[in-house]
Amino acid sequence: MDMDNGVKASQARRLIHCAVALILTGTAAASLRAADSETPSVFRPTVRELSPEPAAAAPRGVAARFDFTPSGEIALKIQPASGPEETVATWSRELGGSPTAVPAATAFPDGTLLVAFRRPTAAGSALVVVQRIDGKWQRPKTLFEETVKGTGRPTEAQPVIARSGARAVIAWYSEADGEPQVLATTSPNAGSMFVQAERIDLGRPAGGVDLVLLHDGTQFVSWIERAGEDSSQPGGLYLRRTTAYGSTLPPALLLPEKQFRPASHPRMAVVTDEPAAPVQLRVNYAPAGQAVASQSVLVTLPDPAVLADADRGCGCAPTAAETAGVTIRARVISTARDKSTVRLRHNAVPGLLRAGETEFAAGRQVVADIRAGLDVLAHLDEVNGTWTLLDYRVLETAPGATGN
């Protein structure tokens, strides 16, 4: 049951290749949109109308809101799954911002919280800020500064956030210097660091940004795009898919602009996220010219094999098995064949595990083969809501070493 170290090394080389190609060289903005207009796409989801009832929101484990303080300032408040509500930041009401806006927040499996919000500045600009709590609130990080020209004011649209495992993606709408744009950035380690923000839109966005994240790290960003001179890119609600390693395809039109109310903000939810099945998303929107407040459509993506074949165009596409889960160094403490579990001592994995000992579910063969006292590279993934030891590779232990 040993893991093939060559596979992991190959995966690392592909991930580095993509990171260099898509992040460090700056190809994520104008060239991305140029490729959209030049590349034929297999990313053509089917859209089917559903009942008008909105989908239930997935529990996030943490809630965030804006409010007024007794002195009239605007305050950002966080309500964890347990414990009292906390005030994270305050600023003068004169600087701008609306207490009716909803900041974005999420909770990670290890209890770390991450919140993203737009904060005005005294200079008249606005900052897209993230702040995390890991036992205590850490220093906020600025992801983006939205500067304005003349007497203009920054947009008050708040960012959106999605999480899968320790990975987090934040997306937002901006009108920096009079140029509307939709941007997204990714953190692989629960908000400890973020990669360079990538432009998502086609050049004429009008806001309405939403975001979902799949188990394997694939992200879907939706937004409203205005009609332009290019008849092949009509106005409407668009969807862009980006894999965990940076491969993207031209976005798809989900709803024409005449189908929803101009001021509406369509929202997405994941319906199907299985390795061998087409991904399905539910999109809720306010229909134009109808009495109902909300309408839903089911969006079914192309077959995973078709998309995987298209992704290989970047020359660096790992398999789904390579991108799923996490690999950590650990020492085997004990096994329990009757419960099909293995107890490991391990270091911290930001967003997922605190340092210490954890009992993981495991297959019968893994439990039968692994032995207490071994130092291993353990490949873990979430299976039906339970973190499971899927595979391992025994590490050579230097003389006198004690492991984790």
Image (spheres, rainbow, N blue to C red):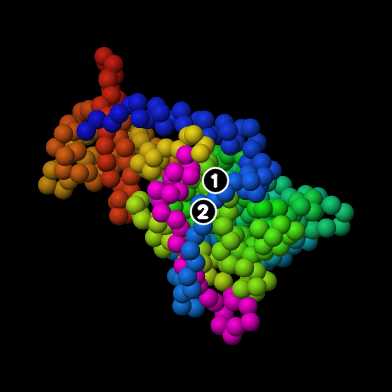
Q: Can residue 227 be seen in this view?
A: yes
Question: Label 2's element?
Answer: loop
Tell me the kind of residue under disc 2.
Phe
Residue 78, image quadrant: bottom right
Of the 4 image quadrants, the one containing the N terminus is top left
Give the magenta range.
286-312
Q: Position of residue 157 (x, y in %)?
A: 67, 61
Q: Where is residue 290 in the image (x, y as percent from the top left)?
A: 60, 83
Count of number-bearing discs: 2
Q: Where is residue 293 in the image (x, y as percent from the top left)?
A: 57, 80
Q: Is residue 369 left or right of residue 59?
A: left
Q: Can residue 120 be seen in this view?
A: no
Read off the residue under disc 1: 248
Image point 52% across, 42% down: which residue? 247
Extreme-right residue of the structure: 150
Foreground: 213 or 163? 213
Mark closest to the chain's N terminus, 2 or 1: 2
